[in-house]
Image (spheres, grey):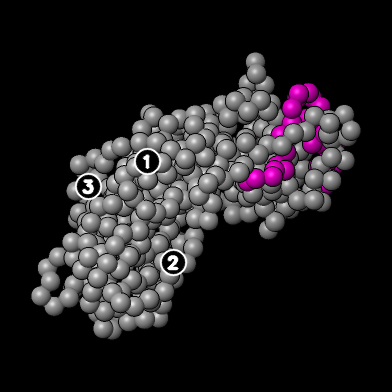
């Protein structure tokens, strides 16, 4: 596990950063995302299709009822399917990979997909879309045709009932008999990151860390005046002002000596006071990739210059919990195997808490093996059975529960969440990680 000196320096100075200077204009964002798509179609998809033993993948979706995997396959200027959009991917074991489109003309697919349907924008084609699909499939004679029907992952279950029935009719009985679930293919496509994406991921997470640094500071929080809900909405407003989006409503929680103010993950409309232990959960989207971050802060009382030692020890315990998970991450092991190992390691270290780490990428709760869930600490059937692959991103999400001597032994949850890259068989914390509490006066 590594945190580079450069990332650490940037993390420590984040409170002074102007993050708007780092964010590209929309046109440049689209160019970056389209270049990544081109690289992914050329490298990631053929490899994953062959690994999963599927030589043809059909992705079918209608406008405004998109398959969840579809948007990751479209160029940045396409914001939805158009009418019915059909993408066909062919990866024969001994032939050239093809990315084909059977869709209305002029909708923006041409740079990345070879058009197979002789359809103009204004005139009907001599061949129906269904007939074109059948011809394209028959000409390539695939052995196994992947379609998006799945039990465990929504990412691989985007083929609606009507579209499934129409697809089977279009293929005919002989070809329909060759269809198989593309669940693991869809997951593999979504979870794998390219070199370009891995290069950019630390900077994207620095933006998220920087925004939290602005929120958890005296520049924003006025003890005795500002509420937790004010800070949560400020986070969302700040992201909006930067031209980005949150993928869930941010939360800011309060833990307070001698009182129960609410659970972690809630934003009470309660005024923040000196002595409060604050927590945030915050995620944004930039360049098509999601972040998911939880950090903690302390509001200094009069005369204090540092947080109580017990709260600082709670964060140190949470960092140790992260380190134990990093040590258990081994390529090829399932999420459930990793979960069992890290829980054993936590018990041996005397760490009380829970582990609910998830993949992240195009989606905040991304595709790949789950390593526990908040309410499933024994195992996660199905979603926890997938193996860990290299060149993937994970959201290290967990909490440690610690008694604080200065609070008369009151127990606090130190919940943390930190994006890591698993690449080269190692865990790398992206954009630094929180090892000291944010201090607010």
- Dot 1, how many residues are within 10 Å of its Cα: few (below 14), some (14-19), or many (20+)? some
Position of residue 97 measured from the top left corner of the image (x, y, whole percent) = 62, 25
- Dot 3, how many residues are within 10 Å of its Cα: few (below 14), some (14-19), or many (20+)? some
Disc nearest the viewer among 2 and 3: 2
N-term mark: 1 or 2: 2
Position of residue 89 measured from the top left corner of the image (x, y, whole percent) = 67, 32
What residue appears at the point 27 percent right and 67 percent down from the top-left corner? 409
Q: Secondary structure at mark 1?
A: helix
Label annotation for residue 8 = 3
What residue appears at the point 71 percent right and 34 percent down from the top-left corner? 146
- Dot 2, how many residues are within 10 Å of its Cα: few (below 14), some (14-19), or many (20+)? some
Membership of 5 in magenta stretch:
no
Residue of label 2: 265
Q: 405 or 239: nearer the eye?
A: 405
Residue of label 1: 345
N-term mark: 2 or 3: 3
Position of 69 compared to 39: left or right? right
Callout count: 3
């Amino acid at each position: 596990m590594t945190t580079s000196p450069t990332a650490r320096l940037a993390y420590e100075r984040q409170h002074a950063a102007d993050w708007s200077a780092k964010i590209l204009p929309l046109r440049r964002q689209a160019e970056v995302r389209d270049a990544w798509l081109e690289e992914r179609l050329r490298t990631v998809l053929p490899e994953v299709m062959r690994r999963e033993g599927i030589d043809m993948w059909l992705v079918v979706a209608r406008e405004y009822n998109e398959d969840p995997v579809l948007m990751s396959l479209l160029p940045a200027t396409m914001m939805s399917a158009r009418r019915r959009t059909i993408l066909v991917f062919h990866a024969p074991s001994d032939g050239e990979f093809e990315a084909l489109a059977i869709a209305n003309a002029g909708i923006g697919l041409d740079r990345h997909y070879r058009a197979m349907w002789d359809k103009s924008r204004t005139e009907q084609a001599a061949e129906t879309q269904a007939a074109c699909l059948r011809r394209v499939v028959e000409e390539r004679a695939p052995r196994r045709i992947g379609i998006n029907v799945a039990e465990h992952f929504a990412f691989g279950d985007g083929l609606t009932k009507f579209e499934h029935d129409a697809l089977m009719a279009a293929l005919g009985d002989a070809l329909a008999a060759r269809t198989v679930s593309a669940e693991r293919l869809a997951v593999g496509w979504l979870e794998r990151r390219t070199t370009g994406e891995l290069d950019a991921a630390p900077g994207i997470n620095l933006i998220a860390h920087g925004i939290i640094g602005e929120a958890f500071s005296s520049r924003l929080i006025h003890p005795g005046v500002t509420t937790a809900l004010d800070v949560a909405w400020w986070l969302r407003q700040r992201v909006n002002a930067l031209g980005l989006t949150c993928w869930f409503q941010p939360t800011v929680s309060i833990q307070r000596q001698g009182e129960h103010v609410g659970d972690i993950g809630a934003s009470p409309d309660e005024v923040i006071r000196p002595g409060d232990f604050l927590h945030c959960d915050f995620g944004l989207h930039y360049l098509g990739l999601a972040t998911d971050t939880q950090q903690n802060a302390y509001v200094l009382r009069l005369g204090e210059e540092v947080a109580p030692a017990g709260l600082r020890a709670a964060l140190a315990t949470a960092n140790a919990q992260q380190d134990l998970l990093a040590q258990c991450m081994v390529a090829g092991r399932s999420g459930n195997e990793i979960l069992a190992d890290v829980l054993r390691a936590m018990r041996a270290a005397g760490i009380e808490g829970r582990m609910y780490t998830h993949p992240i990428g195009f989606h905040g709760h991304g595709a790949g093996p789950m390593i526990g869930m908040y309410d499933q600490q024994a195992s996660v059937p199905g979603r926890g059975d997938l193996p860990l692959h290299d060149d993937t991103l994970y959201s290290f999400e967990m909490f440690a529960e610690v008694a604080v001597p200065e609070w008369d032994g009151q127990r606090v949850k130190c919940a943390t969440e930190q994006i890591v890259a698993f690449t080269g068989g190692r865990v790398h914390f992206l954009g630094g990680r929180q090892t000291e509490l944010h201090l607010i006066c």
